[in-house]
Image (spheres, helix red, strand yellow):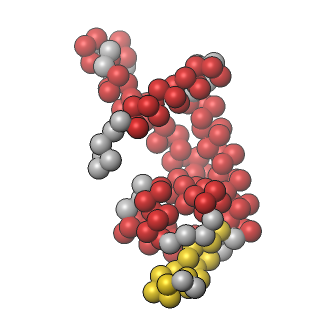
Amino acid sequence: MEPEETPTRLRNKPSWLISKAARRSQRLIGEAMAALDGRAYHFAILAALDEFGPDSQVRIGRRCGIDQSDMHAMLRELTEQGHVSRTADPQDRRRNLITVTRSGRRRLKELDSALSAVQDDLLKPLSATERDSLAVLLTRVLEHADPAS
């Protein structure tokens, strides 16, 4: 649907614009990740481990907003690729601690570069100041969102 063919009442709604931008963003991210034989979830998990250190599958999933059924599959992929390791938690042998490996840190840098390029492509019409303002405004909207959404 071309913008000029979209009803004015619709294209002036921020919710509609956010949805359109999100779909474009997801498409660009998907293409960038596919080119690297990766997934956006891989980036999120590796970034959480890099920033917060070893943690349980449940906490990583919560931090990244990833459903536990998907977390299991993503961690299996990352483990098979050598990007994370699982070890028994010394404080609770019933759970595993997930740790980013040296290979995972290299992979994180690779995925981060690709996602930075997507940001540049997606937001190229905006100045650096406008990009910062957009991030602040969207963060504020999300801070007041229903936690279940």
Image quarter in which the N terminus is found:
top left
State the residue in front, 142 or 29.
Answer: 142
Query: Residue 32, position in %: x, y?
Result: 59, 46
Q: Residue at x 57, y 58 (%)?
A: 48
Residue placed farthest to the front in the image?
91
Residue 132: name its quadrant: top right
Q: Measuring 53% from the left and 40% from the top, which residue is drawn there?
A: 28
Looking at the image, residue 75 sits to the left or right of residue 16; the answer is right
Who's the residue at 29% across and 50% down the image?
148
Residue 52 in picture, x, y percent from top left: 61, 60
User: Residue at 35% of width from left, 12% of height from top?
Assistant: 4
In front here: 20 or 143? 143
Q: Nearer the viewer, residue 131 or 30?
A: 131
Q: Residue furthest bottom?
A: 93
Q: Is residue 73 visible?
A: no
Q: Is residue 123 above or below residue 114?
A: above
Residue situated in front as seen by the camera: 66 or 124: 66
Residue 145, above or below 75 = above
Can you give x and y, in whole percent of width and height, for residue 107 in the image?
A: 68, 60
| 142 to the left or right of 126 | left
Instruction: Give the number of callouts.
Output: 0
Question: Percent from the top left, x then y, of residue 141?
Answer: 39, 31
Q: Is residue 125 visible?
A: yes
Among the 4 quarters of the image, the one containing residue 138: top left
